[in-house]
Structure formats: structure tokens, C-alpha cells
Image (cartoon, grey):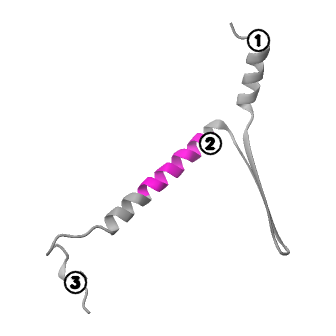
Amino acid sequence: MQNPISARHDAAQASLPNTAALRLRLGRARLRADAAFSSTGLLALAGLLAATLLSTAAIVAVATRKLPAGAMPAGMKRRR
């Protein structure tokens, strides 16, 4: 059986937001950014990032594929 004090501590840790901070200084310019995410928000952000990367890979694959001979419309053929 789990210790009740330990269980309470784990529940308190789970409810705390995940935080990140960035401080950047280049010459006289300064940037400070802080972000806080709940576990659910962090999971949603990871899902959005994964979807973006997968869709970008699909677009690049389609854009760089080689068409079979005669498949390109006449108006799109290169003239050099």
C-alpha cells in the first residue's frame, strides 16, 4: 500500500504546470519569454508539432517526386 503522504505529494506534483524560461541578450537588445503548460497542454502541443512535421514531410515528398513520361500538362512544360 502506498504511503498517504507520498500519494499527496505525487498529486500535488501532477497539478503543477511545466514551465520554461528564455532570457536572451544581444548587444543592447533583450528578450525575455516565460511559458507555463499543464500536462494536457503539453500533450496537445506535442500533437500539433507531430502533425506539422508529418504534413511537411508529405508535401515535400509530393513536390519532389518524379512524374512519369508524358504526365505533365502541356502548359506546365519547361521551355529552355
As helix, strand or loop, the secondary structure at mark 1 comes to helix
Mark 1 or 3, closer to the camera: 1
Cα distance in 3D space between marks 2 and 1: 28 Å
| Tag 1: amino acid | Pro
Circles 2 and 3, Cβ within 8 Å, touching? The answer is no
The percent position of residue 70, horizontal first and vertical second, equals 14, 75
Q: Residue at x 18, y 82 (%)?
A: 74
Structural crowding at the residue carrying mark 1, measured as other residues with C-alpha within 10 Å and reported as few (<14), some (14–19) or many (≥20) = few
| Tag 2: amino acid | Leu
Q: Is residue 75 magenta?
A: no
Residue most extreme to the left: 70
Vertical comparison of 25 with 21: above or below: below
| Tag 3: amino acid | Gly
Q: Residue at x 68, y 38 (%)?
A: 38
The percent position of residue 2, horizontal first and vertical second, equals 70, 10
Q: Please name the predominant secondary structure of the magenta segment in the image.
A: helix
The residue at which mark 3 appears reads as 75
As helix, strand or loop, the secondary structure at mark 3 comes to helix
Residue most extreme to the right: 28
The residue lying toward the viewer, choosing from 14 and 68, is: 68
Q: Residue at x 64, y 36 (%)?
A: 39
As helix, strand or loop, the secondary structure at mark 2 comes to helix
The residue at which mark 1 appears reads as 4
